[in-house]
Image (cartoon, coloured by chain):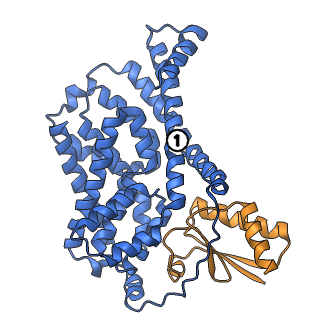
């Protein structure tokens, strides 16, 4: 079970990343909990300078930029193989 | 550079639509077609270039550099310049703010970054370049950077740390950072390009309506408002136009892209350029949405001091431009 978090205070870029992640998870058919972390106090527990941040199992994978569905899919399938 | 575009606008309006070059309507339409295409072109190019910078900008390294080096006051200037070249997203300002302060960067230096980041942003620069030309754009960008430098220094001298929100103070006092684990896969420039391209289009699409409305209003005014109309009322002698412009500008955040074409007509009809630059700076630099976001990390008093100081410096630089330019 993957724990995926999207950190971002609710800007358009963060929403895009969230939606793309949901879509990628659905297309791959893997089991994952995708959470959107919008509370700034919660976000700042991590060492974050620019949002959105995509975290998988508490490891930051993308910072400060949106990632499209295919990129997230690639990332997720790489994780599963290793 | 844009001769071909002028020829196209002339051809479209005067030849195809048969609207005379000597009519108000013809001039206004020609102006509208020419400006819209030119601005959207410039906007895309600049946003795209900034997207490339953004993709490679080592914001974490910058933070560490500013935190670990004694720079004898130059750190304010550096923070301000970095604020100008990093593309601004208002929702990143709070994480950046806390990240900087937590990283040991003085509050004043952080403010330098925070002032310049929205003030000198890619959309404002592209609009300025399209409507006022390279010289005015340089004046705008350089004075924006200096304003951030001096404003940050001034705020730093005031020792405002105690006015941060309580939870931020707690966070700074006993910092329990979750272990930093960050492993982004290296991807090539070629792989990144589609994403940069896409987000540039997104930004341009987001402001295109404001640009068109702004240029349409500008074009209408251009043809119908008499020459020197504003000069009669708001000539450079009227000192109060600068503070008035700043106050009027604060609620206009969302329309930053649409406002420049209107300002351009105001300038053409006699509003002093310094007043116009002040208006522009206040529009993008002092916004209510940003204040709302900052409320999470600062007390109202600190936001008031922050905005008041920036407004004061914008007004002062407006006076200076009106004297110098």
Q: Is residue B217 visible?
A: yes
Point 40% across, 88% down: residue: B170
The residue nearer to you, when weighing A56 against B301, is A56
Q: Is A72 or B56 nearer to us in this picture?
A: B56
**Colour chosen for chain B:** blue
> Residue B82 falls in which quadrant of the image?
bottom left
From the viewer's side, name the closer residue of B309 and B175: B175
State which chain is coloured orange: A
Quadrant including the C terminus of chain B = top left
Give the side of residue A80 with respect to residue B281, left or right: right
Residue at point 25% right, 55% down?
Answer: B146
**Residue B262 quadrant:** top left
Residue ID at (59%, 44%): B205
Q: Is residue B113 left or right of residue B48?
A: left
Can you give x and y, in whole percent of width and height, for residue B145 in the image? Answer: 30, 54
**Residue at the disc numbered 1:** B45
Q: Is residue B308 above or below residue A2?
A: above
Q: To which chain does the residue with label 1 belong? A: B
Where is residue B320 shown, x and y percent of the image?
A: 17, 44
Q: Is residue B287 visible?
A: no
Provide residue B140's location: percent of width, then percent of height. Answer: 31, 44
Q: Secondary structure at mark 1?
A: helix
């Amino acid at each position: 079970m993957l724990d995926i978090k999207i950190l971002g205070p609710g800007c358009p870029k963060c929403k895009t990343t969230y939606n793309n992640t949901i879509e990628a998870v659905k297309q791959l058919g893997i089991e994952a909990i995708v959470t959107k972390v919008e509370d700034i106090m919660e976000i700042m527990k991590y060492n974050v300078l620019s949002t959105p941040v995509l975290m998988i199992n508490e490891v930051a994978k993308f910072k400060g930029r949106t990632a499209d569905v295919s990129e997230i899919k690639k990332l997720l399938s790489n994780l599963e193989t290793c | 550079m844009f001769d071909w575009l002028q020829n196209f606008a002339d051809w479209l309006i005067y030849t195809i639509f048969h609207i005379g070059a000597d009519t108000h309507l013809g001039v206004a339409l020609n102006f509208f077609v020419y400006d819209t295409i030119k601005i959207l072109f410039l906007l895309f190019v600049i946003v795209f270039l900034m997207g490339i910078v953004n993709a490679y900008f080592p914001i974490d390294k910058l933070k560490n550099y500013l935190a670990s080096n004694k720079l004898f006051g130059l750190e304010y200037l550096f923070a301000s310049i970095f604020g100008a070249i990093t593309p601004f997203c208002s929702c990143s300002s709070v994480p950046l703010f806390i990240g900087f302060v937590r990283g040991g960067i003085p509050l004043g230096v952080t403010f330098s970054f925070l002032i310049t980041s929205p003030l000198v942003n890619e959309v404002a620069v592209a609009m300025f370049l399209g409507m006022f030309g390279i010289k005015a754009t340089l004046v705008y960008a350089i004075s924006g950077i200096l304003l951030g430098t001096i404003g940050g220094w001034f705020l730093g001298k005031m020792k405002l740390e105690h006015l941060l929100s309580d939870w931020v103070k707690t966070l700074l006092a006993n910092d329990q950072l979750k272990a930093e684990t960050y492993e982004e896969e290296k991807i090539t420039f070629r792989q990144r390009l589609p994403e940069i391209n896409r987000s540039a289009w997104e930004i341009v699409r987001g402001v295109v309506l404001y640009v068109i409305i702004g240029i349409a209003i500008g074009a209408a005014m251009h043809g119908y408002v008499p020459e020197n109309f504003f000069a009669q009322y708001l000539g450079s002698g009227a000192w109060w136009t600068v503070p008035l412009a700043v106050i009027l500008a604060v609620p206009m955040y969302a329309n930053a892209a649409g406002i420049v074409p209107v300002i351009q007509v105001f300038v053409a009809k006699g509003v002093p350029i310094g007043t116009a630059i002040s208006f522009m700076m206040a529009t993008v630099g002092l916004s209510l949405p940003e204040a709302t976001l900052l409320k999470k990390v600062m007390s109202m008093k600190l936001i008031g001091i922050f905005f008041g100081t920036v407004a004061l410096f914008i007004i002062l630089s407006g006076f200076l431009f009106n004297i110098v330019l």
